[in-house]
């Protein structure tokens, strides 16, 4: 099968695409850094405007008090919204590296490996998305396919200000593409765990530690007992993850029986069917503490992202994605389950089938060792561009979609 010239030529742009990624990664756009997020969005708008002068652009408020800085906005780009077939592509331009983080520098470890904040997660993915659409727009049947891009400022903190944008996009489109980084092996993402958090707050009874008999009730000891039991839940519930995070309690004085303790717990599930049973397990453990005199343990929170479970339509499309990869010479890869969540979780929950992990190969995400293998940007863009070309040409029929209510 022939590959259109604009797609075949993408590897010749590797140096250019790497330089673009380096410029973007040099902009601090930590999720809490409002000025940096504004600058990054402006740079992205300028780059996409030059690439697609006929597209419609909208900057959409994405505020979420308590989660997002005031004034942050998502960038939406739409091309041919009246075309008979519509697809959705997304990425996030925030990173986990805030303005005061020590990791602010881009450096090349070798000719094609960039170590930089957000290099893979996911500014490299946005470079890939942009390059794919640039190549696709030069193919002969591009006018038959409409596309929508959404670039968001709050994925790393839970997408609290942009969730409704994904739900709305899911209603307008037939298929979605999420440009999170590919696995280091080259595999893309088959499914993802749903993510949530619980805050466990324990109240006890203060007393002098030397009082005999002591009528105090230690909130710290009760919470510790609860947390140790909670950490055992995954042994009974396969594919569930529980991680005890921050813990605090007591007072400055060590001769006081502490009346307060609190912990934050990260929880993850693979199947939606595990959500209620998992929360029920936590409640049972809390009730054991609450049955004792002078102690009360409260749980607040829940799931922010539902699990991304593989949909039948994704199974159908993945084989075509692999075929496109073979035709542009990318080494064979498969798809795997990922413990981390993405905005693809929201698309799946809204009924929009999507492929995830379509960006370049990366590793050591969320650390000062984060890298992007820049030589993989163009090949991954080739796969996406060729797939879209085949949809526009009628060679690939996107499966019918049943959108969630």
Image: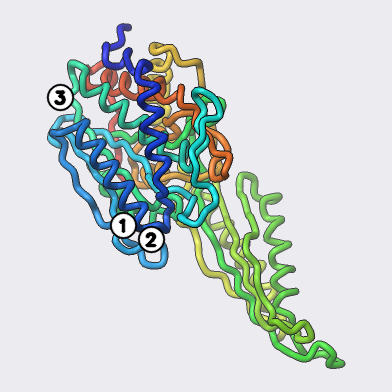
Is residue 241 visible to us here? Answer: yes
Quadrant of residue 22 within the rendered picture: top left
Residue that mark 1 sits on: 72
Residue at image coords 62%, 64%: 246
Task: Look at the numbered discs 1 and 2 and tell me whether their residues touch, using CB distance below 8 Å.
Answer: yes
Q: Tell us which disc is closer to us: 3 or 1.
A: 1
Extreme top residue here? 1
Is residue 178 visible to us here? Answer: no
**C-alpha span from label 1 to label 2:** 7 Å
Mark 3 or 1, nearer chain start:
1
Local crowd size for mark 3, using a 10 Å CA cut-off: few (<14), some (14–19), many (≥20):
some
Residue at image coords 30%, 7%: 2
**C-alpha span from label 3 to label 2:** 37 Å
**From the viewer's perspective, is residue 272 above or below residue 302?**
above
Local crowd size for mark 2, using a 10 Å CA cut-off: few (<14), some (14–19), many (≥20):
many
Badge 2 marks a residue whose secondary structure is: loop
**Quarter of the image with the N terminus in it:** top left
Badge 3 marks a residue whose secondary structure is: helix
**From the viewer's perspective, is residue 22 above or below residue 234?**
above
Which residue is at the front of the view, 288 or 295? 295
Q: On residue 143, which mark appears?
A: 3
Rendering coords of residue 276 (x, y %) = 53, 58
């Amino acid at each position: 099968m022939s590959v259109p010239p604009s797609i075949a030529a993408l590897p010749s742009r590797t140096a250019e695409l790497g330089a673009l990624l380096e410029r973007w990664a040099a902009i601090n756009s930590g999720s809490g850094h409002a000025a940096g997020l504004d600058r990054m969005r402006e740079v992205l708008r300028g780059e996409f405007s030059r690439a697609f002068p006929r597209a419609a652009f909208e900057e959409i408020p994405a505020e979420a008090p308590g989660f997002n800085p005031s004034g942050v906005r998502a960038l939406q780009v739409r091309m041919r919204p009246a075309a008979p077939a519509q697809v959705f592509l997304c990425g996030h331009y925030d990173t986990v590296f805030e303005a005061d983080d020590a990791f602010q520098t881009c450096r090349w470890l070798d000719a094609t490996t960039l170590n930089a904040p957000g290099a893979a997660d996911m500014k490299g993915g946005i470079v890939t998305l942009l390059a794919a659409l640039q190549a696709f727009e030069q193919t002969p049947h591009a006018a038959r396919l409409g596309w929508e891009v959404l670039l968001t400022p709050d994925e790393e903190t839970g997408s609290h200000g942009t969730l409704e944008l994904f739900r709305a996009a899911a209603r307008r489109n037939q298929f979605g593409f999420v440009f999170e980084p590919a696995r280091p092996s080259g595999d893309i993402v088959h499914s993802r765990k749903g993510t949530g958090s619980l805050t466990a707050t324990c109240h006890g009874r203060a007393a002098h530690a030397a009082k005999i008999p002591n009528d105090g009730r230690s909130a710290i000891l009760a919470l510790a007992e609860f947390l140790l039991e909670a950490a055992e839940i995954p042994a009974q519930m396969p594919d569930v993850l529980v991680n005890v995070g921050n813990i605090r309690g007591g007072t400055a004085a060590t001769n006081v029986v502490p009346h307060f303790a609190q912990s934050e717990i990260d929880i993850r599930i693979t199947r939606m069917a595990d959500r209620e049973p998992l929360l029920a397990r936590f409640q049972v453990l809390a009730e054991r503490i609450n049955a004792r005199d002078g102690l009360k343990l409260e749980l607040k929170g829940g799931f922010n992202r539902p699990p991304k479970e593989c949909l039948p339509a994704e199974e159908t499309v993945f084989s075509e994605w692999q075929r496109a990869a073979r035709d542009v010479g990318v080494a064979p890869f498969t798809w795997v389950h990922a413990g981390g969540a993405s905005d693809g979780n929201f698309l799946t929950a809204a009924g929009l089938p999507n492929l995830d992990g379509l960006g370049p190969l990366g590793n050591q995400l969320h650390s000062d060792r984060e890298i992007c293998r820049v030589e993989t940007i163009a090949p991954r863009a080739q796969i996406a561009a060729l797939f879209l070309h085949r949809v526009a040409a009628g060679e690939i029929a996107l499966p019918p979609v049943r959108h969630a209510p």
